[in-house]
Amino acid sequence: MTQTQPYGTVLIKADKILDFLSSAPTPQPLHTIAKATEMTNPTTLKILGTLELIGYVTKNDTDKTYVLGSGLVRYANQYLANLDISKIAYPYLKELHDKLDETVHLSIREGDEILYVNKLESMRPIVVTTSRIGYSKPMYASAMGKAILSELPEAEVDAYLERVELKPFTPHTLVTATTLKEELAEIREKELAFDNSEEQIEVFCMGATLSINGKNYGAFSVSMPTYRRTPEKEATVAEAIRTARRGILKELQNVYMYI
């Protein structure tokens, strides 16, 4: 029996590219992608251009390499809800949310950005309007992102700073490598990261990473309006974050003990 040929073979070729990029540990140049997917450079370039246009891949204009983009994930809220880290962390984040009644976020790293995979809204007024599930933001301008950066080896931080332009979102954004590195050192010491109106004005965040055995599984944070920030509130939030983090890491250790 003759096998029916699929309609639109370009989609199959695009899928090959996405599969390859998803398994590649680092950003990949055009010729490597073409060779791995058994396509010519011109064909691969055309498909990559379309994938970049719709956000499925991201191109680094400096070294002409490609990584997966966030476009696919933005259509996958159901998938995000089923991520292991989302399932494992949820009871602890819910307890954190109930205790503080402030907005709690969970994110994972996606390239040089963090991607929000869960959000528990505060019942009280808050000025956070940009955060939502599926939303990405630069790591250097968020508590969760800086927490993840603080765990990277110095060489990886340097490489990140070479790739990423530190653009100001507010007057408080850290926009020099020196100030960012100084803050990363402080985060490593305290095991807590802060975002003091750096991405959005009048919003204060505290965050921590979720890593075991040298592998990062994400980060979480508590966000509040700056007018509710006091030394007493900071101490309460910091202790609550540390408690939640211990619980989540214990669960992660149990789940991934054989990895």
Image (cartoon, helix red, strand yellow):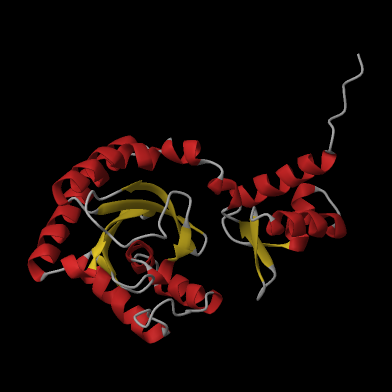
Q: Position of residue 216 (x, y in %)?
A: 38, 54
- Which residue is found at the position 30% from the left and 77% from the top? 183
Q: Residue lying at the far right in this picture: please name it.
A: 2
Total tally of numbered discs in the picture: 0
Quarter in which the N terminus is drawn = top right
Q: Tell which of 100 and 159 is nearer to you.
A: 100
Q: Is residue 215 left or right of residue 39?
A: left
Q: Is residue 240 left or right of residue 122?
A: left
Q: Tell which of 237 and 215 is nearer to you.
A: 237
Q: Residue lying at the far top in this picture: please name it.
A: 1
Q: Position of residue 145 (x, y in %)?
A: 38, 64
Q: Tell which of 256 and 127 is nearer to you.
A: 127
- Which residue is found at the position 35% from the left and 68% from the top? 146
Q: Is residue 205 left or right of residue 100?
A: right
Q: Is residue 218 above or below residue 79?
A: below
Q: Is residue 109 above or below residue 257?
A: below
- Which residue is found at the position 16% from the left and 58% from the top? 237
Q: Position of residue 121 (x, y in %)?
A: 29, 49
Quarter in which the C terminus is drawn = top left
Q: Position of residue 187 (x, y in %)?
A: 26, 70
Name which quarter of the figure residue 191 lies in.
Answer: bottom left
Residue 212 in view in this figure: no
Q: Residue lying at the far left in this picture: please name it.
A: 232
Residue 55 in view in this figure: yes
